[in-house]
Each structure stands twice: as C-alpha cells, then as structure tokens.
Image (cartoon, rainbow, N blue to C red):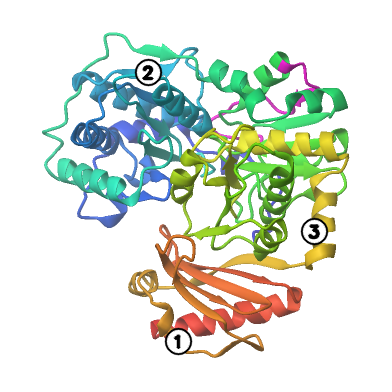
Amino acid sequence: MSDRAGTPATESDLVDVEALIAAYYAGVPDVSDPAQRVVFGTSGHRGSSLDTAFNETHIAAITQAIVEYRASQGITGPLFVGRDTHALSRPAETTALEVLEANGVHALVDAYEDYVPTPALSHAILRYNREGHDDQADGIVITPSHNPPRDGGFKYNPPHGGPADSDATSWIANRANELIADGNRDVKMAEPSGVDTYDFREHYVADLENIIDIDAIKRAGVRIGADPLGGASVGYWKLIAEKYGLDLTVVNPTVDPTWRFMTLDWDGKIRMDPSSSSAMASVLAHRHDFDILTGNDADADRHGIVTPDGGLMNPNHYLAVAIEYLYTHRPEWRQDAAIGKTLVSSTMIDRVAESLGRRLWEVPVGFKWFVPGLIDGSVAFGGEESAGASFLRKDGTVWTTDKDGILLALLAAEIVAVTGKTPSQLYAELTERFGASAYERVDAAASKEQKARLGKLDGSAITAETLAGDPITARLSEAPGNGAAVGGVKVVTEHAWFAARPSGTEDVYKIYAESFRGSEHLREVQAEARAIVDAALGA
C-alpha cells in the first residue's frame, strides 16, 4: 500500500497525452519480445504505446485478424465499434475503422461520437441479432477498463454479445502476431468514406425499464449520486435522469484523459477502480449526500456501491445482497435458473444460494463463462468478485452478456426503494444468518516459469491435509460448475478457502482467500496458502 493511496493526483502523476499518442503512431513492436506481442487476457489485449505494447501496428493487425476470424465463422452482419475515454481509444478506433473500411466490413459507430460503455455495445449486438436479420452482428469495444490513463485496450465480442472465448481470442492473437512479424503486409487499410452510426445510448437507456423497477425508484424518491469516474457512462447517467425523472445527480461529469481529478489507488497509481476505497476517496466524501452513491470504471462494466451507513461495499458483499434480492423479487425468472459465480467469489454466495434452494454454478475467472447461461435463461445472474455482473430482464430473457456496472448501480437504488434498507444493512442481515467472513486478495512473487507451472497445476499436486487447522475437503483445478480448467488451484475447508492463480501481467501469483472464522484466521490461511503453493511449485 502506497502512503499516497487515496490522496489527490498531482502533476507528476499525470500521463503526457501528446507523448502517449505520438508513441502510438511511432512505435513499431518487435513480436520476438513477449512484452510487445498481442496477448488477449480475460478482457482483450491491453498495453501502453509507451511500452510498444499498444500501437497502430498492433491495432491494425488485431482488426485484420478479427476480419478474417469473423469471415471464417460466417459472420457477415454489421460490426459495432465503441470506445471509452482513455487517450489511446480514439486513435485505436481510427485505425480499426480504416482496416474495416478496406475489408468491406460494415462498421457502426456512436451516433453522437460519444463514448460507448461495454454493456451498451453488448446490448446493441444482442438487440440486432434478436431482430431476425439474415446476418449476425458482432462488435469491438476499445477500452482497458479500469487500467491507468497510459494504457489502451481492445477486445472482441462475437454475436453472442459477450467476451470472446479462448478459442477465438487465441486465434485472433496468433494471427495478429503473424501479421506483425510479416510487417503487416497483409493488413488492408483505407480512409473511411463515411461510417454509419447507431444510437447506443438511446436504445440502452430506453430498455432499462424492462430490467429495473424504475417506477419503484421514482415513487420512493431515492436520491442517487452517480460518479462515472471520468468514464464512458457520463452521458448515460444524464439521460437516465432526464428520461425517467429520477432524483439522480451526476457527481462529477468531467472527462479528462489524464484523470487529474482522481485520488490515487492502493499502489499510488491513477486507476479508475470503483471497488477500491483509495480510488473512490473523493466519491466517498459525498456518501451522506445521497441514499445511494455509485461509481463506474472507464467502460462502465464495473460498479462501486456506496451507502451512507456503510461506505464503499466490498464487491462480494454487494453481489450476495443483489442475488438474494433478485431471486426473491423476479417471479418470472425460471425456477431452475442457477446463480453464477466465479470460484474466487465469496462463499457467502454459496450460502445464499442454498437458502434460496437455487443451484450454484461456479466457474473459472472470466465473465465469458456466464454467456451461454444468460442467453438461454438457465443462469439468471452471473457475477465476479471484481465488481462485475449482469442479470436477466424481468421476463427472464437476456439483457447483456457482458458485465454491466450501470445496471448493478441502478439495482442498488431499486433495492433501497423496495426494501427501505440499504444494501449494507441487508448484508448485515445476511451475516446474522450465515456468519461474517473475512476476504482478501494478495500477491506473492513468482517467476515466469513458476507462473506457467501454477497455471497448469493439478489439484492432486497439493499434498497438504489441513489448512489453518481445518481438514482440507477439496483440491480443485477444475471449476465445479462446468469442469473448465481453473488456471491455478482452489483449496477448500469447512470454514475457509484459498485460490491461487498466476498474474497475466506481472511476476506474481494472486492468492484469493476467505475465512468465516475472522481476520486472524484469514492471515493463517494466507500464510499457509503461500507455503502450500510454493511447495507444489518447488519454490
């Protein structure tokens, strides 16, 4: 934790936007350097032009690869393109449109040249494909999510509207790297003669009444504060307030590619993470001004929920409350619809699911795993511990197949309106029923070789019999819900668990841990987790 965490950014913290954009066009990556290759993580390719990791060469190659991939899949409909407020997003959009034009792909951009939240792009894809056209649409969203201002991001959403699966992203990344290695000679580019548009904002906002009880919020007069944190949701919150006549204030409508108005995150960097109390420090100063106060990251796929009585909620706590509320207030949802969670999310969700008599569907990290269930209604809610979730419309049909931070923020206002209690108060009631937990994620050093071994580690390699004094009941390297590889391990006891996964960007592995025996027991779990994993890796 930096001693500057939670303090306002200063001039020395700000990125030089002109230098950032100049490097985007000037830098030529060397794909023999792993740090300069195209790599799709759980949310697309990310990097900085200053590190020659996100440059025009990368984006041209990735877009050409997407063109070739969609052709191989028989995808011939329009391709929706949206961008967030990061400085590198606009030049990346320009590059992508030039490639799409030269390849004869029908691109649709925002009607107002506005920013496009990730959920609005997912919503647009699903809307088009639901209308019965002879072709299918897909999309590109240009965002590094909550990453610092120096970063750019680029991800592909196929016709199902959610994040592309590993087969697709691996193909696209491999092809893009082949193109770059050959000097992008097979990349076609042309100045667009004119790009068609789509009103992402109007269609998304007009549809919200079919998934959120807007009337209840309005009747109750819930005072909502929404902080876009300088991100793509800024115009959406304004329209939501106007269209539905809600008592909703956009706390800070400023958009600035340096994010000079932010407070620094835990490590002293500017990062738009709405689940971080350090990044949300300036927002938290307004907690008593509203009945519910929310934050979103740069592409609005994450949510932060602030209550006047509890402050910033732990994402796991809010997910548990949201699940308990939704499954008792959405009578048209299928009675056999499961509750989706990632295996590093809180066990409180398991206990809530059991009390509701609902099947728990536990999957590896990555929202892509929830996509099929959300589409067919067999999973009514999918949530990640990193403050990302989406759920079904009131009638049990699909809303978005990507994370929706705007939706989860509005749900918090509905919960207040309908129950008369804040999500913090409702979580306190859950702890009275199921016990209180201590949860934390920490990092531990690991070499690239150790990370590679951890990613392929089998649960049977864990030889320990106990964890922090309790017998180990499960050693998982595959997710219980779908049998997919975890990309690490999860070790479970009656009262606690830990999961270890390699970082995709740093020489560390992440340890997620939770204990229902308090914070001291959690420390024991974390310490033994390091020892257990190190022993399995031969560290």
* Residue type, label 3: Leu
Mark 2 or mark 3: whose residue is earlier in sequence: 2
Q: Is residue 252 magenta?
A: yes
As drawn, is 11 to the left or to the right of 522? left
Q: Residue at x 48, y 80 (%)?
A: 533
- Magenta segment main secondary structure: loop
Q: Give how far across and how far down residue 7 sits, in percent.
A: 71, 47
Quick check: 333 above or below 31?
Answer: above
Label 3 sits on a secondary structure element that is helix
Q: Position of residue 308 (x, y in %)?
A: 86, 43
Q: Are marks 2 and 3 in contact (CB under 8 Å)?
A: no
Mark 2 or mark 1, whichever is nearer to me: 2
Q: Dividing the image into 4 quarters, which one contains the C terminus?
A: bottom left
Give the CA distance from mark 2 to mark 3: 45 Å
Q: Nearer the viewer, mark 1 or mark 3?
A: 3
- Please name the residue that numbered disc 2 is placed on: 108
Residue holding disc 1: 535
Q: Nearer the viewer, mark 2 or mark 3?
A: 3
Boundaries of the magenta span: 244-261
